[in-house]
Image (tube, rainbow, N blue to C red):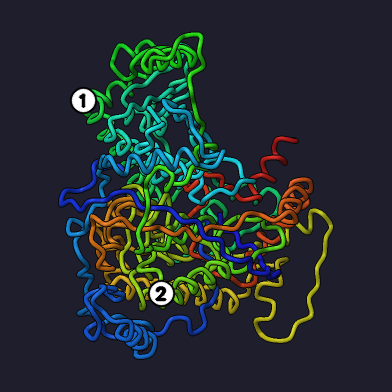
Amino acid sequence: MSKLILLHTSHHLTPIHRRVLNAAVLTPLSKPLLTPFSLSGLRLQCLRSSFSPPLSLRSLSARAFDSSSSSSSSTKEEELKQIDGESGPQGKVNSESVNTGTPDKDYPTGEFQFQKMSSWKSFVVKLRMLIALPWERVKKGSVLTMKLRGQVSDQLKSRFSSGLSLPQICENLVKAAYDPRISGVYLQIESLNCGWGKVEEIRRHILDFKKSGKFILAYVPACGEKEYYLASACQEIYAPPSAYFSLFGLTVQASFVRGVLENVGIEPQVERIGKYKSAGDQLARKTMSEENCEMLTALLDNIYGNWLDVISSTRGKKREDIENFINEGVYQVEKFKEEGWITNIHYDDEVISLLKERLGVQKEKVLPMVDYRKYSKVRQSTVGLSGSKDKIAIIRASGSISRVRGSFSLPGSGIIGEQFIEKIRSVRESKKYKAAIIRIDSPGGDALASDLMWREIRLLAASKPVIASMSDVAASGGYYMAMAADTIVAENLTLTGSIGVVTGKFNLGKLYEKIGFNKEIISRGKYAELLAAEQRSFRPEEAELFAKSAQNAYKQFRDKAAFSRSMTVDKMEEVAQGRVWAGKDAASEGLVDAIGGLSRAVAIAKLKANIPQDRQVTLVELARPSPTLPEILSGIGSSLVGVDRTMKELLQDLTFGGGGVQARMEGLMFQRLEGASQANPIFSLLKDYLSSL
């Protein structure tokens, strides 16, 4: 949905808290990753002079931001000066420049290799466990249990936060693989509210855990495609007799409210640049455009095709057999057992009894178990996963992008440009980090913030290697950030690109007439009423200026993307136009360098920083600080006045901001494909209004 939230209130920057994690054992391999499976928008305001016209890339390295560790910091600084100060008019990249980055197969995969501990190290680990802090103590022979359901955040969670954290899920599986106190893992998988990128990351860690030789079981009381995709990586799958199985295929949907707006007297005036840019279509159209249909169909084919490939490989069946089974509309749990989709039909208590029998625990005794939240408190060093002096910073950027924290923003929500820049600068100014990984899970946001962060990432890349690791989505503002890195790593199904812009305003004249409201404006300046006069349509000269502003913003975004990826403008135009790509297609088009998860990004960072692949490194998470008491109370207060907050956001959205131009990935498409809650308040309001009729 084309919305733009006005952010007028600055926010005092909070101090940066760091959390240290140790990288898993990674070994470079020549083969590809194990499996083939793996905005809300960018507020592109007029970026005055933010685009210095790119110069010919002949004077630069093969990649515009090549951060090979052999390059000196001074050389990289000189390149940045050249990039910023010696460009031709209108941001034209030299036609001879091409994207000649390292092919995906030449990057280390970062595949996990389980290594048994030596006798001495095993003794040291057991000694550490004897003197471990109370909350790190786990009974020998315990089973790690994790309930995977609902929202999965790409951010680290504080002790006051609820829900699941992808970093903590993955870290728990790595720790459990080496922890002598853990006998196996019991996953209870229900309806997941996350994208395919996170699902693939979790699945990869399940497969890694199995290399330890320990068991890992899945229990699926409610199972769709994402849930089964995870469960299929486990050794055994159990379901209760009444389990809800809904493996019926995948859909992508788009809703349009143009007719509703017309009925209430609202005329949306939308300027969209990029034929695939679907953001704003919900407002301006009543049906799906051919280009949007083409894009969504390609994305759906990628998701469904990869799902069929992975499941057929896992189950040892032909792809057509899997597809035929899905098309039968099977919902009976018994049929899934008969066809080998699940191991057996059991209730949860029966599965626990099986685990007792497997571990030699008497029936009348309680099975020793440790849950996700408690096990997350166990440090990696406690289980012998010590790092080294070589440190790599992990900077996470998750959610919509804002330059400063807004009046109605909840603590820890979205990417706050000021705070992100503070983290980037701290890494750049510190000599202890050998490289940095920007972990991105963002559909976009404020363009000014995106550009400022882009600049800071470039400056960081001038001093040390920077790798972008993309999760569920890195589109519009999210991709804007990523393209400043030396190397971009994405999952097969990461939503990528969306290089396009959209802007607009609402003409509320007829609505005002219906409700008896009048507005009169006294102005000075030919275009002073461009956005102030929402009670009328654009005048011809205003419409022309509006269109030129959007076109200018699109050219700036496209040209900067072309330069960042060492492409010609013409080549970038072919893959831009507001199109959203699946990660593997983005890689073939030159928007992404390698396919994989965070472990591959770490391996590439080690390669760039001249760190041997068989050497462990210490990953330092520049995590969000724990919320303060005032912030917690503020969050509670916000929930109590939710209606007032929603109305204020709605009124801000209706103005499209102060003349802002956006490059936005359609919120509804993101919601349908990724299962995230990205609905615009206007839809909530319309839903409530229609339900009251």
* Residue in the picture at 46% in, 45% down: 166
The answer to whether residue 288 of the structure is visible from this angle is yes
* Residue in the picture at 22% in, 31% down: 313
What type is the residue that disc 1 sits on?
Answer: Gly
When asked about the image quadrant of residue 200, the answer is top left
Report x, y in % for residue 402: 58, 65
Q: Residue furthest left?
A: 30
The numbered dot on residue 45 is none
What type is the residue that disc 2 sits on?
Answer: Lys
Q: Is residue 371 above or below residue 425?
A: above
**414 left or right of 607 in image:** right
Query: How far separated are the C-alphas under marks 2 and 1?
Result: 50 Å
Image quadrant in which the N terminus is located: bottom right
Report x, y in % for residue 228: 38, 28
Per the image, the residue denoted by label 1 is 316
Query: Sequence order check: which comes first, mark 2 or mark 1?
Result: 1
Report x, y in % for residue 489: 32, 57
Per the image, the residue denoted by label 2 is 431
Considering depth in this image, is 116 or 164 the residue closer to the camera? 116
Report x, y in % for residue 627: 66, 54
The crowding category of the residue bearing disc 2, from other C-alpha atoms within 10 Å (few below 14, some 14 to 19, many at least 20), is: few
Considering depth in this image, is 603 or 552 the residue closer to the camera? 603
The crowding category of the residue bearing disc 1, from other C-alpha atoms within 10 Å (few below 14, some 14 to 19, many at least 20), is: few
